[in-house]
Image: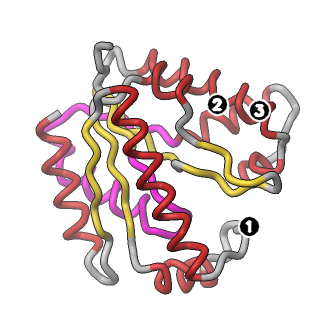
Amino acid sequence: MKTLKVVIVSGVPGVGKSTVINGALRMVEKKVDVQLVTYGDVMEEIATKRGLVKNRDEMRKLPANVQRDVQKRAAEKIAKMSKKQLVVVDTHTLILTPEGFLIGLPRWVVEAIRPSSLVLIEANPQKIAGRRAKDKTRSRDEQDPKGIDAHQQMCRAASVAVGTLTGATVRIIRNKEGKAEEAAGIFADLLLKV
């Protein structure tokens, strides 16, 4: 399976993924032609056009079979984008739903996107819980630090599965409290090598 110029970046909600991604993109903006795509935004656009949701936070409330269909359509759209330039896909490896964890990167998604690399952003579970509590811009499900730690461990396993299916490399970057710039630098270095 030939890989595309796609780097998938994932992490649990509140890990600081967007901060790390945006910092890295600023560092490489004059060196690499890259497009940032938020998987949830692509899914939301598809689901909204179909009249399934009014906002992104409603996505995880949809039945799993509907979410899977929207996921597949979003993957196909993102794969087309990667033919023109490097694409960084901001997504989640696992999504907590009322029915349990929905795999954010199932076989049909990663086979369509064919990433060259998968980057997993991690942070201290206590710090993540604190960030979530302070973030009033999103409607996030509550999860205690033990649940967040288990979620991160499951994301590691899912990331290795993606690498196994696609041949993508898997990189874990720790987003330590107050050191987002350092994590962004590590990610920027990876982008320069894709």
Q: Which residue is mark 1?
A: 139
Q: Residue at x 71, y 31 (%)?
A: 68
> Does 110 sit above or below residue 178?
above
Q: Give the structural element (helix, strand or loop) at label 1.
A: loop
| Residue bounds of the magenta highlight | 9-38
Membership of 17 in magenta stretch: yes
What residue did someone put label 2 on? 71
Which mark lies nearer to you, 2 or 1? 2
Please tell me the numbered disc located at residue 47: 3
- The answer to whether 170 is drawn above or below residue 69 in the figure is below
Q: In terms of sequence position, does the residue under pointer 2 or pointer 1 come before the other?
A: 2
Q: Nearer the viewer, residue 19 or 112?
A: 112
- Residue at 73% from the left image edge and 25% from the top image edge: 69
Mark 3 → mark 1, Cα distance in angstroms: 18 Å
Identity of the amino acid at label 3? Ala
Indicate whether residue 10 is drawn in magenta.
Answer: yes
